Image (spheres, rainbow, N blue to C red):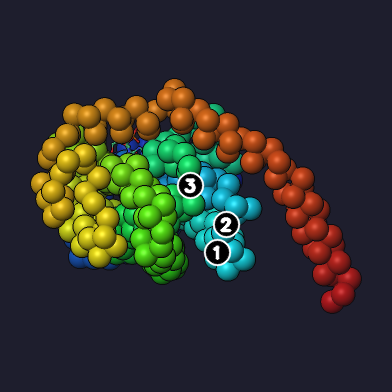
Amino acid sequence: MYTQALDTHGKEPLPAATGESPAQAQRFQARVDAEDKIEPKDWMPDAYRQTLIRQISQHAHSEIVGMLPEGNWITRAPSLRRKAVLIAKVQDEGGHGMYLYSAAETLGISRAQMFEQLLSGTAKYSSIFNYPTLTWADIGAIGWLVDGAAIMNQIPICRCSYGPYARAMVRICKEESFHQRQGFEIMLTLAQGSGAQRAMAQDALNRWWWPSIMMFGPSDADSRHTAQSMRWKIKRFSNDELRQKFVDITVPQAQFLGLRDPRPGAALGSWHAALSDRPDRLGASFMRCSRATDPATANALEARRAADEAGHWVREAAAAHARKQRTRAPQAA
Ligand code: BYC
């Protein structure tokens, strides 16, 4: 059994497992089935803990890697209002990463360990953030499609069996909903604009549609973790179920914008069949893009490492300030 690591906030290495009895596993599953929340100090199977650490840390990494392609557009946003909104969005994503790292820390891994896994390329993050943002319309498409897919995926996690993850997701989903709307509003403005602006919006849709679809992970047949995650109520729906819901909601939005099906030559309104169209190509491009050896992944990781390096002095200054505050506080009292 594990000694739970809440009191040390995961700053110490996990103790070695000493085995789990079938009775313990059964009692645990009964709690999950009864919709009890599992809390950090409760007993949990090691595989449950590891699955959560993997999923939550991948999720946290996605949030902070996702700040970079959008952050690139802050200086190039077309108006002061757009700039202010984009700054707030990128800042929100950083906040999401922080809540999620904190939730993962309750499982006995430290933020430093997770960061090391990200920067060394051993941890995964959502492959969507390896695609370049070429035009302003990409910022609209990211908000509309990427945050839209994230909401579809993440709303069910608000009911996840692990308490700290479920609670962190409530605020994150509220903020993602705002992000989705600001992205749609950018797309709407472009779609109602000049011919060049409409073409830019269509081009962004064409490039972001398939990667957004792949945010839901591999097909159910290829998914490694879904079945067990659903038994443990970490996931409530399978990858393909969520993907289909996303398509069903997003296609009418695209039609409202007057945009065409991204597949060359396809008729408007035929998108519902699109998911089964090119599973091999989709799967292959997805797998390539989620590997650390892929050039786009390597570039994104390099940008993340550079951001980490550039932010070093800020973290040092914040730590020095906190130390000063701590020494001053007793004197003031
Ligand atoms: N990219 O068995 P599966 C955001 C990996 S950030 C790369 O189905 P699972 C935002 C998967 O890790 C949105 N890899 O796994 C931020 C696994 O690899 P390993 C992030 C992927 O966990 C800034 C393997 O494929 N959201 O919203 O049951 C700006 C087999 O997959 C991807 C979350 O993370 C991918 N897309 O299901 C804007 C949500 N998908 O570890 C927006 C929480 C899968 O076995 N996470 N892989 O080597 C989840 O819901 C689930 O983890 C997933 C995958 C649906 C993503």
Q: For the residue marked with disc 1, what is the amino acid?
A: Arg
Q: Could you give the CA–CA distance between mark 1 and mark 3, rounded to whole angstroms?
A: 14 Å
Which residue in the structure is indicated by mark 1?
82
Residue 135, disc = 3
Which of disc 3 and disc 1 is earlier in sequence? 1
Q: Is mark 1 within 8 Å of ligand 1?
A: no
User: Which percent across, then down, holds residue 131?
Assistant: 43, 38
Q: Secondary structure at mark 3?
A: loop
Q: Is mark 3 within 8 Å of ligand 1?
A: no
Q: Could you give the CA–CA distance between mark 3 and mark 2, rounded to whole angstroms?
A: 10 Å
Q: Secondary structure at mark 1?
A: helix
Q: Nearer the viewer, residue 1 or 98?
A: 98
Image quarter hosting the C terminus: bottom right
The image shows residue 186, relative to residue 23, as above or below, that is below
Check disc 2: other Cα within 10 Å, few if <14, some if 14-19, many if 20+: some
Check disc 1: other Cα within 10 Å, few if <14, some if 14-19, many if 20+: some
Q: For the residue marked with disc 3, what is the amino acid?
A: Thr
Which residue in the structure is indicated by mark 2?
77
